[in-house]
Image (cartoon, rainbow, N blue to C red):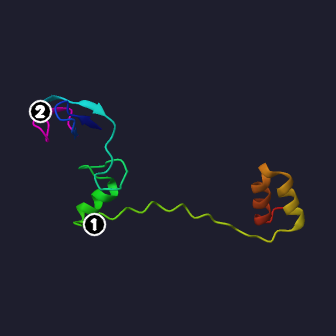
Amino acid sequence: MAFLCPGCHARSESVVGLCPSCGYVGRGQQVGPVPCSIEGCNRDPYAKGLCEPHYRRAARGSTSTAPVREPAEPARVVLSLRVPEDVRERAISDPDGARRVLEEWARGTR
């Protein structure tokens, strides 16, 4: 959480104490979270004014300010089976029980 200095209106992480910008001693006003300090990055801060990916880069010694890639969407698995016509019809006619019908067919119990 960030706080706004009443003296110079600078954002600070500390609610009470000395403002790092103007030296004001007092209680700051609570404001919303400050985004990552890397230009163009709008992620929430993780530590030292940086989002988690930029903080981890800095901890490794990298000076890169390149944008962080968004996580990829999870891969969808599409399984194609050749099922007998009667099994297919039962699965289509009962969408709620389709999984059960296909599992029975796969196990050979039906």
User: In which quarter of the view is residue 84 placed?
Assistant: bottom right
Front residue (pair 58, 90): 58
Q: Is residue 102 above or below residue 50?
A: below
Count numbered badges in the picture. 2
User: In which quarter of the view is residue 65 placed?
Assistant: bottom left
Point 55% across, 61% down: residue: 74
Point 86% across, 53% down: residue: 93
User: In which quarter of the view is residue 52 placed?
Assistant: bottom left
Residue 24 marker: 2
Q: Is residue 14 above or below residue 61?
A: above
Q: Is 48 on the left or on the right of 71, as rendered?
A: left
Structural crowding at the residue carrying mark 2, measured as other residues with C-alpha within 10 Å and reported as few (<14), some (14–19) or many (≥20): some
The earlier-in-sequence mark between 1 and 2 is 2
Front residue (pair 9, 26): 9
Q: Quadrant of the C terminus?
A: bottom right
Q: What whole-number distance in Å separates the C-alpha atoms at marks 1 and 2?
A: 33 Å
The amino acid type, in three-letter code, at marker 1 is: Ser
Residue 101 covered by magenta stretch: no
Q: Which residues are magenta?
A: 13-24
Q: Residue tagged by mark 1?
A: 64
User: Residue 15 location in percent, x, y?
Assistant: 21, 32
Q: Are marks 1 and 2 in contact (CB under 8 Å)?
A: no
Mark 1 or 2: the one toward you: 2
**Magenta segment, principal secondary structure?**
loop
Q: Is residue 8 above or below residue 65?
A: above
